[in-house]
Amino acid sequence: MPRDTARLTLRPFEKRDFGPLAELIATTWLRDFPGRPGELASTAELCDYLSQTTWSLVAEQNGTLLGAILLHEKDREVAEERLWRRRGLEAERAAAVSSEATLAVGTEMAGVIEGSALAREYALTGAPEASRSLKLLIVSPNARGLGLGKLLFDKMRSYLRERGAAGYFLLTDDACDVGFYEHMGLVRAVERKSGVPWPGVDPNTDDFHIYVYSERL
């Protein structure tokens, strides 16, 4: 378990990071879908993010991936968009052989689709922040308390300032620590009750929300 960030390495995402990062997503956010279903769902979700990623940073210590941040910039091309979209589709097809995997991938990707629709809606407002979006920020539970989330976040903001970006936005929901973004100075631009049903939750009483947070740089 890491004690500090003294021997922490920060570098761009590489293909070898895919497995550890997908596993981190599965164990952090998809614990209701253990095993293969969660693996396929996290694979499909991560491929969607990577198919839009133009800038990235991962944090590792002693060869262990501890966190990552992925950014999309509207004015830059994604180097391997087709690769990641194809891999995501393969995961969705693989899930079809199991009802549990079908449920896991279908539920998770429904949330991704809902978030994408909200992002497009926000972009139509013409807000200066709408041309850059944070696709993923995740930190391993083993690294919590080290300030790693803030470190990755600040690195992203420094990069955007260097490029002269007017701002950025991100999508999040009640499953995440939205207070972190408010602490970092972002403002809640949009709040919407989610229409995606979660297995085992009564949709009549579910009060799960998704949000757009933004920051002007």
Image (spheres, rainbow, N blue to C red):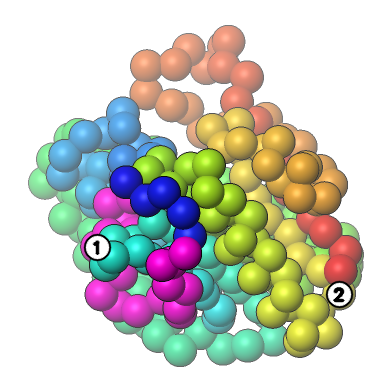
Which residue sits furthest left?
A: 97
| Label 1 Cα neighbours within 10 Å, binned few <14 / some 14-19 / many ≥20 | some
**Magenta run includes residue 19:** yes
Identify which residue is drawn at 44% across, 16% down: 201
Q: Locate residue 74 relative to residue 110 in the image: left or right.
A: right
* Residue 19, image x, y percentages: 24, 62
Q: Count up the numbered dots.
A: 2
> Disc 1 designates what residue?
19
Calculate the distance from the C-alpha at mark 1 to the C-alpha at mark 2.
34 Å
Q: Is residue 89 visible?
A: no
Q: Name the secondary structure under disc 2.
A: loop
Q: Locate residue 116 relative to residue 61 in the image: left or right.
A: right
Of the pair 167 and 64, the residue shown nearer to us: 64
Q: Is residue 142 visible?
A: yes
Q: Amino acid at mark 1?
A: Gly
Quadrant of residue 86 in the image? bottom left
Identify which residue is drawn at 79% across, 55% down: 214
**Magenta run includes residue 140:** no
Q: Amino acid at mark 2?
A: Ala
Q: Name the secondary structure under disc 1.
A: helix
Residue span colored magenta: 6-24
Of the pair 56 and 51, the residue shown nearer to us: 56
* Residue 66, image x, y percentages: 39, 56
> Disc 2 designates what residue?
166
| Vertical position of residue 184 compared to residue 199: above or below | below
